[in-house]
């Protein structure tokens, strides 16, 4: 991805939150999204239109009960880039850095939120929660291959048909990062 305007669109905390809600919960109205985020309906509508301008969210008029109701659904919201894509573009480099920073802050915010709730959380969820880290020795090509395999695995879980077994399923946030480092 080399359009820094897409990164600039997602490098906003409310827009990132809207994308997260649509990913986790499916289509929603601006009113519903406003209630879930604590933002004003007008603000949510504005930010949804910004995301829609880049195809990240789409209007879903077929879900509306009347002409005043405006529904949004996730569009092509997979945003992937390399900082090298914007090495010669100051605006792109700034958008890339802002999107990366916001993503990291959001991941840590969600992790901290979970950690603060574990004492009162359902023990089944506490037992099922997962954390791992490890050191691997890889070439850049091997890291790209491993990353693609992880993405494919997570995508398969995200898009699977949910069993009709009566089990209650909750939204689960999964994130992984892999990069060269020294212990």
Image: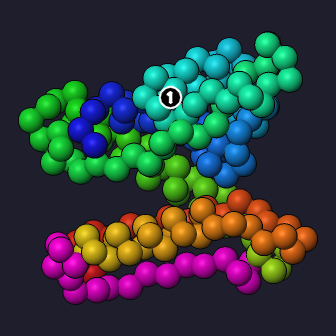
> Which residue, as the protein is rendered here, is positioned at the far front?
62
- Report x, y in % for residue 96: 29, 40
Query: The C terminus appears in which quarter of the rendering?
Result: bottom left
Image position of 106 (left or right of 102): right
Residue tagged 1: 51
Answer with the quarter of the image where residue 3 lies: top left
Query: The N terminus appears in which quarter of the rendering?
Result: top left
> Which residue, as the protein is rendered here, is positioned at the far left?
88
Residue 60 position (above or below residue 27): above
- Report x, y in % for residue 91: 22, 27
Q: Which residues are magenta?
A: 126-142
Report if residue 144 lies within the magenta region: no
Which residue corresponds to the image point at 84% horizontal and 70% vertical from the top-left? 164
Which residue corresponds to the image point at 68% horizontal and 15% vertical from the top-left? 42
Image position of 94 (left or right of 47): left
Let me know if residue 100 appears in the view: yes
Residue 12 position (above or below residue 138): above
Q: Along the line of sight, which residue is nearer the eye, 52 or 183?
A: 52
Q: Secondary structure at mark 1?
A: helix
Which residue corresponds to the image point at 55% horizontal and 78% vertical from the top-left? 131
- Report x, y in % for residue 136: 28, 86
Instruction: Provide the major secondary structure of the magenta segment.
Output: loop
- Report x, y in % for residue 17: 60, 40
Which residue corresponds to the image point at 12% horizontal and 41% vertical from the top-left? 87
Answer with the quarter of the image where residue 179 lies: bottom left
Image position of 80 (left or right of 9): left
Q: Along the line of sight, which residue is nearer the eye, 143 or 113?
A: 143
Let me know if residue 116 appears in the view: no
Report if residue 141 lies within the magenta region: yes
């Amino acid at each position: 991805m080399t359009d820094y305007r897409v990164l600039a669109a997602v490098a906003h905390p409310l827009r990132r939150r809207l994308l997260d809600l649509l990913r986790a919960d499916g289509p929603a109205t601006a009113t519903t999204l406003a209630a879930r985020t604590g933002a004003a309906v007008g603000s949510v509508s504005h930010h949804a239109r910004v995301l829609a301008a880049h195809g990240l969210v789409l209007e879903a008029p077929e879900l509306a009960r009347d002409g005043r109701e405006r529904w949004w659904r996730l569009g092509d919201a997979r945003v992937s880039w390399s900082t090298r894509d914007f090495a010669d573009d100051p605006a792109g480099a700034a958008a890339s850095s802002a999107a990366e920073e916001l993503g990291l802050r959001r991941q840590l915010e969600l992790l901290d939120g979970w950690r603060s709730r574990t004492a009162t959380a359902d023990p089944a969820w506490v037992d099922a929660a997962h954390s791992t880290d490890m050191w691997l020795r890889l070439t850049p090509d091997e890291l790209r291959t491993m990353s693609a395999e992880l993405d494919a695995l997570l995508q398969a879980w995200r898009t699977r048909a949910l069993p009709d077994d009566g089990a209650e399923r909750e939204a689960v946030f999964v994130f992984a990062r892999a990069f060269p480092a020294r212990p």
